Image (cartoon, rainbow, N blue to C red):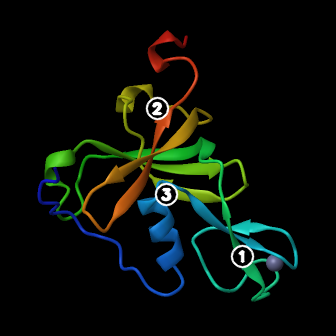
């Protein structure tokens, strides 16, 4: 059962439609360039490395590490009840970085370099948001 979701939802257009359909199916889809072999994120029809339009979708591993993060104490509109909340930049195994949030972990336990894996938050029947959670040792076991 879904309660009404009142926070902003993504604007889904032709370049990102497959990404959001993948998220809804609990798959993290990433663009890969067939010309230079590099992955990129956010999804675009042109490779940002070599400007080739020969790009494909691949299923990402969903694993990565926290590249950087911040804790927001002044909320964005509609996020007033969430403060303090984290915004993380996750470096995926494929080498791209994506902005998201880490769940199942207190903000105090977040660390740069922490191994994380994707989880899917079905916020509406149409939209699923990829988020991340720690993997490996529980954060509180770290020294
Ligand atoms: Zn390329």
Instruction: Give the x, y percent position of residue 118.
Output: 51, 45
Badge 3 element: strand
Q: Earlier in the sequence, mark 1 or mark 2?
A: 1
Instruction: Give the x, y percent position of residue 102.
Output: 42, 41
Residue that numbered label 2 is attached to: 110
Q: Earlier in the sequence, mark 3 or mark 2?
A: 3
| Quarter of image, ligand 1 | bottom right
Up the image or down, 10 lies above or below 141; here it is below
Residue that numbered label 1 is attached to: 56
User: Could you give the CA–CA distance between mark 3 and mark 2, rounded to whole angstroms?
Assistant: 15 Å
Tell me the tag on residue 99: 3
Up the image or down, 59 lies above or below 51; here it is above
User: Could you give the CA–CA distance between mark 1 and mark 3, rounded to whole angstroms?
Assistant: 21 Å
Q: Residues within 10 Å of mark 2 (few under 14, many from 20)?
A: some
Locate residue 43: give its quadrant.
Answer: bottom right
Q: Is mark 3 within 8 Å of ligand 1?
A: no
């Amino acid at each position: 059962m879904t309660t009404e979701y009142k926070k902003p939802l993504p604007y889904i257009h032709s370049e990102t439609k497959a990404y959001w359909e993948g998220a809804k199916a609990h798959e993290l889809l990433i663009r890969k360039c067939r010309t230079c072999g590099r992955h990129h994120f956010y999804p675009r029809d042109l490779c940002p490395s070599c400007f080739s339009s020969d790009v494909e979708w691949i299923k990402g591993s969903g694993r990565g590490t926290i590249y950087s993060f911040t804790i927001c104490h002044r909320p964005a509109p509609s996020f007033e009840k969430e403060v303090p909340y984290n915004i993380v930049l996750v470096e995926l195994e494929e080498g791209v970085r994506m902005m998201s949030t880490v769940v199942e972990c207190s903000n105090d336990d977040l660390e740069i370099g922490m191994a994380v894996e994707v989880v899917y938050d079905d916020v509406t029947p149409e939209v699923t948001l990829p988020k991340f959670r720690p993997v490996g040792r529980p954060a509180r076991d770290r020294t």
